[in-house]
Amino acid sequence: MELVEVTVFYLEMMAPTRRVIPPPRDGLTVEYWRSPELASYRSLYNAVGQDYLWRTKLKMSDEALAALIGDPLTEVHVFHVNGVRAGFAEFDRRQPREIEMVQFGLTREFIGQGLGKWFLQFMIDKAWSYQPQRFWLHTCTLDHAAALPNYLKSGFVQFKQEIIHREL
């Protein structure tokens, strides 16, 4: 078993941002995916996370994953570009007065086109529509190099950092 040292950054927003990001192109939509089918969810999760060693949800049993993504306080939002699945975001709203964005990303073919900034702001606006006291997430050095700078530019503030060792 090979371990790698990873720095994890914990970020939060305590109030909504007031940024307006114009869509970088036509054909952008976000679909709220209620109770996604397991194979489709795993496929999209892997398509977005394969380059960043996302494995947590792939290791979950079907029963555990179905219970999680079927929970009405778990939200999966799929980002489409001209009808093609281009990424997704997942909210955990199970804690009162806060929302955690547990997943966020684009598939490989849509990275580097300015789409992530627009989709991130869309999800920030969606989170604040619930009027939480706190919206938070974590990212790490295994994620795309633009992730942390984009989160910070969008108004998130780092509140914690730690080094962990993770299995490759």
Image: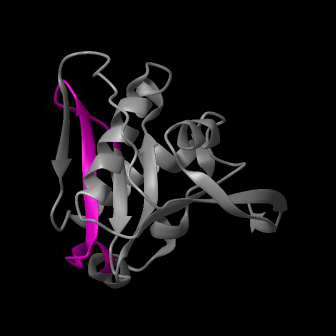
Q: Position of residue 167 (x, y in %)?
A: 74, 66
- Position of the C terminus by quadrant: bottom right
User: Is 20 placed left or right of 60 in the picture?
Assistant: left
Residue at 23% over, 57% down: 129
Image quadrant in which you'd find residue 96: bottom left
19 is higher (above) or lower (below) than 91: above
Task: Look at 41% across and 80% down and name the residue there.
Answer: 61
29 with respect to 164 (left or right): left
Hey, which quadrant is residue 79 in on the image? top left
Q: Please name the predominant secondary structure of the magenta segment in the image.
A: strand
- Which residues are drawn in magenta? 68-87
The residue sitting at 17% across, 68% down in the picture is 35
Q: 114 and 88: which one is in front?
A: 114
Left or right position of 28 against 43: left
> Measured from the top left, where is residue 91 in percent x and y?
35, 64
Give the quadrant of the N terminus: bottom right
Query: Is residue 75 part of the magenta span, yes or no?
Result: yes
User: Where does the image place residue 46, in percent across and percent down from the top left?
Assistant: 45, 51
Give x and y (percent) for residue 12.
54, 60
Please state the total of marks drawn on the protein image. 0
The residue located at (36%, 39%) in the rendering is: 18
Q: Nearer the viewer, residue 12 or 114?
A: 12
In depth, the one of 134 and 37 nearer the eye is 134
